[in-house]
Image (tube, helix red, strand yellow):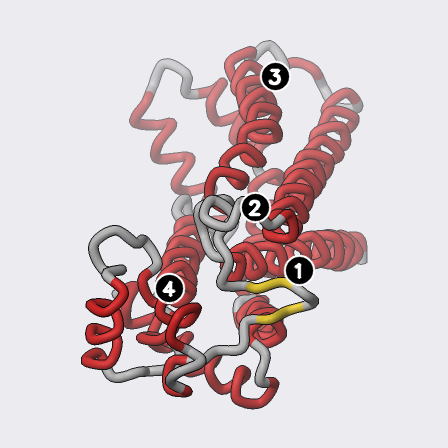
Amino acid sequence: MIAFFANLFGYLLNFLYNLIQNYGIAMILFSIIIKLILLPNSINQQKTMKKTAKIQEEMKIIQVKNKNNPEALQRETMELYKRENMSPFSGCFGAIIQIILLFSVLYLVRYPLTYMKKVDPEIINEYSEQINSQENDAYPEITIIREKAEEDDRVYINMEFLGLDLSNIPSRDFDDWRTYVIPALYVISTFISIKLTNSLQNKKKKSKNVKENDKDKDLVPVKTDESMEEIMAQANKNMTYMMPFLAISISLVAPLGLALYWLTNNVLMIIERLVLNRFIKDEEEA
C-alpha cells in the first residue's frame, strides 16, 4: 500500500519537477499541494480537538456519577459522544493518513528513479550492479543519480537548491558544512511547532480552569482527572525535548530532499495551526 501511494505521489512530484526543472522547488510545491489537499481533514481535526475539550466537563460528571459502575460509565460515555455527534476514534483517521504520508514520502525520496522518474527497473539494476550499491547502500538510487547522471539523462535529476545538493546525506557527506543547514532548520522548526502546540493547549487549560472556578464546586473532588491532566502535561513537556533529538537522528541519515520536505511541512503546519486556531475560535465566538 505504501508503494502504491509513493508511486501516486511520484506522478505529482515528477509533474512539478518537469515544470520547474528543480527538485528542491518541486518538493516545496509538492508539500504545499499535499497540505492543501489535507486541509479539510486538518480543519476537522482542529474542530474535533476543541469539541473534545468542550465535553470534558460532562465527562467529569459522568465519571463521578458512575465511578463504581463501569458498565453505566461506558454506556453514558457512548451516549455523550452520540449526542455530540462525535466518535471516540475520530482522531485515528488523521493519524493513519499521517503515517501513510510519512512512509510514502520516505519511499519517494529514497527511490526517486523508481517512483518519481519511473525509470526502467532493468536500468536501475544495471547501474546498481556497476556501482555495487544494492547491498551496502541505504539509498542506492541516490548514489546512481550522483554517479551516473552525467552519463545518462534518464537518471538525471537536478538536485541543486540554493547552493545545496539535496542528494547529500549528512552522515555520508559530513565534511560539507552546508549539508547540515536544512536539518538544523528542521530541528528548529520542530521546537517551534511543539512549543506552539503546548502553548495552545495551556491556553485552553487556563480558560477551562477559569470557567470551572466560576461554577459550583461540588464536582471538583475528582482528583483522578486532574492527575491525568498533569501526566499529559508532563508527557508534552518531555516531547518538547525528545522530538528534536529524534528529528536530528532521522535527518542525519536521510537525503536532504527528505529534510527539505519535513522542514516545509513543519513551517506550513505552524502557519496552519495559528490560522485554524484563530478561525475556529472566531467561529465559536460568533
Q: Earlier in the sequence, mark 1 or mark 3?
A: 3
Q: Position of residue 190 (x, y in %)?
A: 63, 43
Residue density around tag 1, few if under 14, some if 14–19, many if 20 or more, within 10 Å: some
| Image position of 124 (left or right of 115) | left
Could you tell me which residue is drawn at 63 percent across and 60 percent down?
A: 264
Up-down relation of residue 71 to residue 226 (above or below): below
Q: Position of residue 85 (x, y in %)?
A: 48, 54
The residue pinned by badge 2 equals 175
Is residue 104 shown to the viewer in this render? Answer: no
Q: Earlier in the sequence, mark 1 or mark 4?
A: 4
The residue pinned by badge 4 equals 143
| Circles 2 and 4 in contact, beta carbons < 8 Å | no
In whole angstroms, how far apart are the C-alphas of marks 1 and 4? 30 Å
Could you tell me which residue is drawn at 53 percent across and 45 percent down?
A: 174
The residue pinned by badge 3 equals 219
Give 230 or 112, whichever is nearer the viewer.
112
| Circles 3 and 4 in contact, beta carbons < 8 Å | no
Camera-side mark, 3 or 4:
4
Q: Earlier in the sequence, mark 3 or mark 4?
A: 4
The residue pinned by badge 1 equals 268
